[in-house]
Amino acid sequence: MTAAELMPKNADDLVLLHERAEKLAQSLDLKQPQHKSHIYMQFKLNDNTLFGIEQNMLDEVLYVKRVTTLTWLPTFIYGVINWKGQVLTVLDANYLCHQQVSTINEMSKIIVVTYEKKSIGLLVNELCNFYHYEDSELKTNLQSPIAFNKNYFLGLIDSSVILLNMKVVLTDPKLKIEYQ
């Protein structure tokens, strides 16, 4: 059987074939914004405020145990731990966001975050779950509730979850410990 034999012969079939071809030939509107979907881990701090970190920044979640606290470290650093054979700094997320030290409980965890081969631990009071959001859902024109550095605030999701910009946290020169 040839392709010519498969072609419609009557006028009604030819009209239908032409209509289908026109629909398939319509160009896609490439000017429409493409909404990218993201996944973030939601967690709570002392005052039960909800925060989130994008999943692509997460490396591991650890129990709060065997954290070594050093009195000479700045207040925003909870301590250090041995993580995969290296010393990992654990930041107090509550202090970074509210300038108050965390209240440790049985639900507290350390979230290990990595960006460009830099890793830190982030002490949080309670992990919630993973959730999705789209770029269009992230509200960035609101005033940041974060006291330490407004750039740590990436946006607000559902008017209740503050998404942290961990790229800024990990590259902030103010969080660098200067040895003297």
Image (spheres, rainbow, N blue to C red):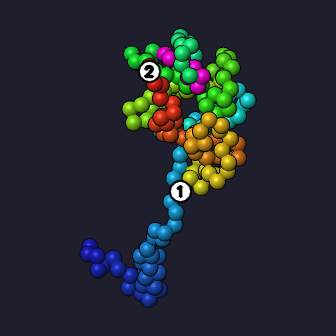
**Toward the viewer: 12 or 134?**
134
Position of residue 41 in the picture relative to residue 105 (left or right): left
Q: Quadrant of residue 162?
A: top right
Q: Position of residue 42 (x, y in %)?
A: 62, 35
Residue drawn at the location 30% of the way across and 79% of the way down: 5
Residue drawn at the location 68% of the way across and 32% of the way down: 98
Badge number at residue 179: 2
SS class, disc 1: loop
Badge number at residue 56: none
SS class, disc 2: loop
Position of residue 74 in the picture relative to residue 118 (left or right): right
**Toward the viewer: 72 or 109?**
72
Residue drawn at the location 53% of the way across and 56% of the way down: 35
Q: Position of residue 1 (x, y in %)?
A: 26, 73
Specify start and end residues of the magenta stretch as a single range. 75-81
Q: Residues within 10 Å of mark 1 (few under 14, many from 20)?
A: few
Q: Position of residue 107 (x, y in %)?
A: 65, 20
Above/below status of 75 relative to 69: below
Question: Is the residue under label 2 in contact with that under label 1 (CB below 8 Å)?
Answer: no
Q: Position of residue 122 (x, y in %)?
A: 55, 27
Would you say residue 110 is visible in this rendering? no
Residue ID for mark 1: 35
Q: Main secondary structure of the magenta part?
A: strand
The magenta stretch spans residue 108: no
The magenta stretch spans residue 76: yes
Tell me which amino acid carries mark 2.
Tyr
**Toward the viewer: 97 or 20?**
97
Distance from the alpha carbon under mark 1 to that under mark 2: 45 Å
Query: Which comes before the other along the chain, label 1 or label 2?
Result: 1
Q: Quadrant of residue 21?
A: bottom left
